[in-house]
Amino acid sequence: MVVGNLLLNGDGDILSIESELDSFLGWNISGSSLSSVSMLDILDKKRNPYESAAKLMENLLLRSVHLLYLRDSAGVSHLFSATPELSEGSPETVILHLVFMDDGDESILEQALREQKQMTSELLTIANIMYIQTDAQYHITDMNHWAERSLETNRIDIIGSHISQLFTINEQTLQLLEKALKDSGHYQDLEMRVLLPDDEERIFLWNIKTFHLANRSAAAIHFFGHNVTERKRMEAQLAQSEKLSAIGQMAAGVAHDIQKPLMSISSLVQMTEEYISEPFLKEKFSQIHNQIDYLSRTVRKLVDLSKPMSGDREWVNVNEILQEALRITAYDSRIKRIDINQNICSEIKAIWMNFDQLLQVFINILLNAADALMQTEKPKIQIITECHITYINILIRDNGAGIAPDILPKVFEPFFTAKKEQGGTGLGLWVCHNIIMNANGKIRIDSEPARGTAVHITLPVKQEP
């Protein structure tokens, strides 16, 4: 059996050849100048049709075993199994291990290669992991069923697209990825996000491996990933819970220290006010009353912060709670001038939730919308409920002032407010968020300045515990 190694550079030029292999082929390459001898010179191009040495090298490093037909000096083709390996001592070169195959070996090896390819394909198809393959320019060339399912896309439609058309990935991240792949050939734990057609964002964590040519240019890039959206959500909730637990403990202490002197001040102001008749002083005392009321409201909310979210749950109808919220807010002067349009699902399912807490959410959102519509010439609020098998969607949209992009990510943070001049405490939306999340729901706000705001709420349809 003829066995030997070829040493190639990234351009496919032969750097060295073992003597037994050279003698068998009769080329006497080892005794000549190797600088002008290419792998293509000894390859049977009819049976291995490669248009260039670069294409040959690219294909060699895509798989672990190949069948190559090499011509001897008399022009006769001989079949070899070829196993490529990047040289550890010289990263710019490739070692090609060649083993001569007789006619019987050819069919056996071809069958083994077909079985290996089929097994690999089936493993990638049934594996509970996402797999995407791209070329060196990050254009998608393949993906498995699990990737199609997780990304809610179709393989045929996405083939040829750039990876950035599928995932939210900025230029800086792409540059970091390229540098890591060039330096080490792999990248661990790359986080990429995708926005699905229903505006749901999913987060995926990827391990990425590339095959290199000897000159270190990428031939194919393989992405192996899994969905970490739920894990990230739980981590964020845990971090938020720890943060709010600390805030709640602080709030309880601050509220206790403030409440008693505040009550004393309020009583003294009321007693003193009885002896004042001058209009100027009466006006000033009225302002003091307003500030005391504001402080009292803040203290009550601070006390609420220190208490765990609780409340008896029952079967409730979302539409009925929305109507109750509209009935209560109808007495507010800001609401009276607004055109409210409703598109309500008549067959909405009951959900297992605390009535008063959900009522509080809707009232808060409606009053926020009313504030945003104060300067709008034709103010409108649209309310939509949608019925699904396992969940209910509620949309409350206005055409008001909108929220600035730099403020939008902070609206659910406690004590953050853009309405300080109107006496906002920054706790309203945080409370709404806490109520919805405690019910295993979701709440999201989309907004554009001068175009309005949309609040999206999703609540699961649950079975009674």
Image (cartoon, rainbow, N blue to C red):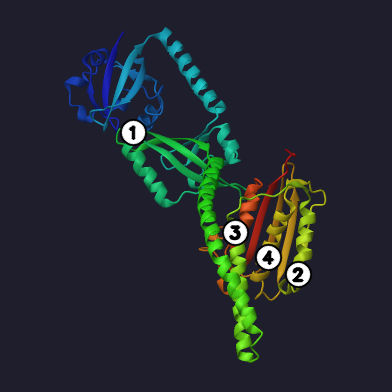
Disc 2 or disc 3, which is closer to the eye? 3
Instruction: Decide if residue 182 is in sight here.
Output: yes
Q: Which mark is residue 283?
A: none
Q: Earlier in the sequence, mark 4 or mark 2?
A: 2
Specify few, some or many for label 2: CA neighbours under 10 Å numbering under 14, 14-19, or 20 or more: few
Residue type at numbered disc 3? Val
Name the residue beneath numbered marker 4: 398
Q: Quadrant of residue 375?
A: bottom right
Q: Which mark is residue 213?
A: 1
User: Considering depth in this image, is 17 or 188 the residue closer to the camera?
Assistant: 188
Q: Residue at x 33, y 31 (%)?
A: 53
Indicate whether 405 appears above or below 90: below
Specify whether 82 is left or right of 461: left
At which x and y percent is residue 60? 37, 27
Residue type at numbered disc 2? Asp
Disc 3 or disc 1, which is closer to the eye? 3
Q: Earlier in the sequence, mark 3 or mark 4?
A: 3
Q: Could you tell me if the residues under marks 4 and 1 are in contact, i.e. CB atoms within 8 Å?
A: no
Q: Residue at x 35, y 19 (%)?
A: 82
Disc 3 or disc 4, which is closer to the eye? 3
Name the residue beneath numbered marker 2: 339
Distance between the alpha carbons at the discs numbered 4 and 2: 10 Å
Indicate whether 83 appears above or below 297: above
Q: Earlier in the sequence, mark 3 or mark 1?
A: 1
Q: Residue at x 47, y 48 (%)?
A: 169
